């Protein structure tokens, strides 16, 4: 298959993978990605999952094909390992990203503490701690998450580099310069694929940075995407599918592959 698509950046949960029921994977979508890979296109999964959680997902859902690259936790860039490891950092991006996050969480500790106070006192949401401090949180409902993000939006006005990635009831604190779009841009720079030849698909808040047209000329979303995502995709001249999950990704790939 000859197409304009040279790089695919696809979200995992809710986009490639249906969490709404069977089938979890769309067979036609898998087959089309395989064909595009055979024709030389590069497939990256761009997810909020960690490397380990993504690997368990690929195994649990019996993926028939392997991604060429993975972009994890909405920020890190990995290529296949050269020394027996499954994946290894691609370039120095992950190192820079980790350093900037350490500096950010230290300089924004006051604002972060206010957010944690609000969350623990006014909501039932659970804060997730990592060795370096609070990493994110899990709310009990999307409504509760709306309350939390409203509070963060006010609090971060005093420290705009402190941002967050939101996916359903999950939230991860992050540096404003690091998100799925930035990780995709770094991968595209390293493998030298221009914006015009990049296809993206995602369904939630944390996908908008790769769907707004800035880093990819062919953004798309499945029908199950939230309203904000559909609006962003339309505004960027992308494709909003009529079908959900993988079937929607297939539809969007066919839309762009044929032109
Ligand atoms: Mg998703």
Image: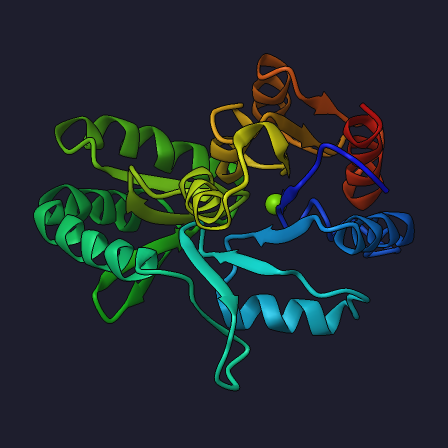
Query: Which of the 4 image quadrants contains residue 233?
Result: top right
Q: Please give left or right for residue 99 compared with residue 23 in the image.
A: left
Q: Position of residue 240 (x, y in %)?
A: 73, 24
Rendered position, 178 above or below 52: above
Q: Residue at x 79, y 70 (%)?
A: 62
Residue 13 in sight in this render:
no
Tell me which corner region of the image, top left, top right, bottom left or bottom right, holds residue 59: bottom right
* 250 and 172: which is toward the camera: 250
Q: Is residue 105 visible?
A: yes
Residue under the point 63% across and 43% down: 7
Residue nearer the viewer, 79 or 4: 4
Whether residue 259 sits left or right of residue 228 in the image: it is: right
Q: Residue at x 77, y 39 (%)?
A: 249
Q: Which of the image's four quarters has the N terminus?
A: top right
Which residue reaches farthest right? 28
Residue 138 image position (x, y, % from top left): 44, 53
What percent of the width, then of the height, locates residue 151?
Answer: 29, 32
Tell which of 217 and 203 is nearer to you: 217
**Location of residue 232 with respect to 131 vertically, above or below:** above
Q: Residue at x 48, y 57 (%)?
A: 72
Quadrant of ligand 1 in image = top right
Identify the image quadrant of the C terminus.
top right
């Amino acid at each position: 298959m000859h197409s304009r698509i040279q790089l695919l950046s696809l979200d995992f949960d809710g986009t490639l993978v249906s969490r709404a029921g069977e089938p979890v994977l769309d067979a036609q979508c898998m087959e089309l990605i395989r064909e595009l890979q055979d024709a030389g296109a590069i497939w990256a999964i761009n997810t909020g999952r960690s490397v380990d959680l993504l690997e368990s997902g690929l195994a649990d859902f019996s993926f028939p094909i392997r991604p060429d690259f993975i972009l994890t936790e909405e920020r890190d860039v990995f290529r296949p390992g050269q020394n027996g490891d499954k994946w290894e950092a691609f370039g120095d991006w992950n190192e820079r990203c980790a350093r900037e996050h350490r500096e950010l969480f230290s300089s924004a500790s006051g604002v972060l503490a206010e957010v944690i106070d609000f969350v623990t006192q006014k909501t039932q949401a659970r804060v997730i701690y990592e060795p370096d401090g609070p990493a994110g949180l899990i709310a009990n409902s999307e409504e509760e998450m709306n309350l939390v993000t409203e509070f963060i939006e006010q609090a971060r006005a005093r420290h705009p580099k402190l941002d967050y990635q939101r996916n359903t009831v999950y939230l991860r604190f992050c540096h404003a310069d690091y998100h799925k779009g930035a990780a995709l841009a770094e991968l595209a720079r390293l493998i030298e694929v221009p914006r015009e030849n990049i296809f993206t698909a995602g369904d939630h808040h944390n996908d908008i940075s790769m769907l707004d047209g800035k880093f990819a000329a062919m953004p798309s979303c499945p029908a199950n995407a939230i309203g904000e995502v559909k609006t962003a995709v339309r505004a960027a001249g992308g494709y909003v599918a009529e079908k959900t999950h993988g079937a929607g990704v297939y539809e969007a790939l066919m839309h762009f592959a044929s032109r």
